């Protein structure tokens, strides 16, 4: 069965500094990969997705992620964070053709002034 | 219209009450989902409807009863809930092939 690991439960980072949130998934032949963001008291919003094609994926709010098949990773990056990026970030994976997506446990991004 | 709407935003109910949560999407998506999310945890899948038929039930207690009246609507009927059922209930929908799920804002449920 597919699984997702987000090793960091919380990541503190200073405002305007770069950040990387790590995500690893269990191996599968063909997968779809997602990063979702959840602001306090809100639903989940899609940041970016990898379905096929270029391994570098650009999303909203200046975020990007790189799909690395050999490392089974899909790390999320932003070159300069803002206080408004304070939120919970979930990595998710699904096998192609499957209705279910599997979420990681989430990483709380805490921006320090 | 590219959003999923959910009503009500907040719901407080007693353990003997019957209530319903409603979800609506007009994106022509063929799959709709109910999730339960506790604080500081990821969403937990409860039910999946595909082409208006229940395709996945993740061993959810029978006090939760889903219903899909048509391709745009999804309900979750609640009866005899327990305080531990208090959570954020999220609805989502997805297209045929991409599995990208669009989430609603959720209903914050409190069971007294």
Image (cartoon, rainbow, N blue to C red):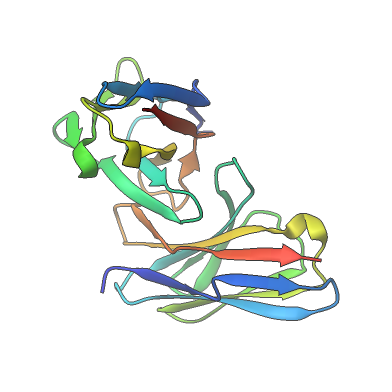
Query: In the displayed structure, does residue A61 sit left or right of residue A10?
Result: left
Camera-side residue: A40 or B24?
A40
> What's the residue at 35%, 44% (across, down)?
A96
Closer to the camera, B33 or A81? A81
In the image, what residue occupies the spot 29% across and 44% down?
A: A47
Give the quarter of the figure containing the N terminus of chain B. Answer: bottom left
Query: Residue shown at 34%/15% (left/top)?
Result: A71
The quadrant in which residue B82 appears is bottom right
Q: Position of residue A12 (x, y in %)?
A: 43, 23
Could you tell me residue A51's position as x and y percent? 25, 41
Quadrant location of the C terminus of chain B in the rendered image: bottom right
Provide residue A101's location: percent of width, then percent of height: 45, 45
Does residue B16 appear to the left or right of A67 in the view shown? right
Residue A20, located in which quarter of the rendered image?
A: top left
B70 relative to A46, above or below:
below
- Viewer-closest of A92 and A9: A9
Residue extending furthest front? A113
Instruction: Name the residue: 77% across, 67% down.
Output: B62
Seen from the viewer's position, the closer of residues B63 and A107 is A107
Is residue A30 placed above or below A39 in the rendered structure?
above
For the image, the number of numbered tags is 0
**Can residue A63 be seen?**
yes
Q: Is residue A73 visible?
A: no
Residue that lies at the very extreme toward the right in this rendered image: B16
């Amino acid at each position: 069965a597919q699984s997702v690991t987000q090793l960091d439960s919380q990541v503190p980072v200073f405002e305007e500094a770069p950040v990387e949130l790590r995500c690893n998934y269990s191996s599968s032949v063909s997968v779809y990969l997602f990063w979702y963001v959840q602001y306090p008291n809100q639903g989940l919003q899609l940041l970016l997705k990898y379905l096929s094609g270029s391994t570098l994926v650009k999303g909203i709010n200046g975020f990007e992620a790189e799909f690395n098949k050999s490392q089974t990773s899909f790390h999320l990056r932003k070159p300069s964070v803002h206080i408004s990026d304070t939120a919970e970030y979930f990595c998710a994976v699904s096998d192609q053709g499957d209705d279910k997506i599997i979420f990681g446990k989430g990483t709380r991004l805490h921006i320090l002034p | 219209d590219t959003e999923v709407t959910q009503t009500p935003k907040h719901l407080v109910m007693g353990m003997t009450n019957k209530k319903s949560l409603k979800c609506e999407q007009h994106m022509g998506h063929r799959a709709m989902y109910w999730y339960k999310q506790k604080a500081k945890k990821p969403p937990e899948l409860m039910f999946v409807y595909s082409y208006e038929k229940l395709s996945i039930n993740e061993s959810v207690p029978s006090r939760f009863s889903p219903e899909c009246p048509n391709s745009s609507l999804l309900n979750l009927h609640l009866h005899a809930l327990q305080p531990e059922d208090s959570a954020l209930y999220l609805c989502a929908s997805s297209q045929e092939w991409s599995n990208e799920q669009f989430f609603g804002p959720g209903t914050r449920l409190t069971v007294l």
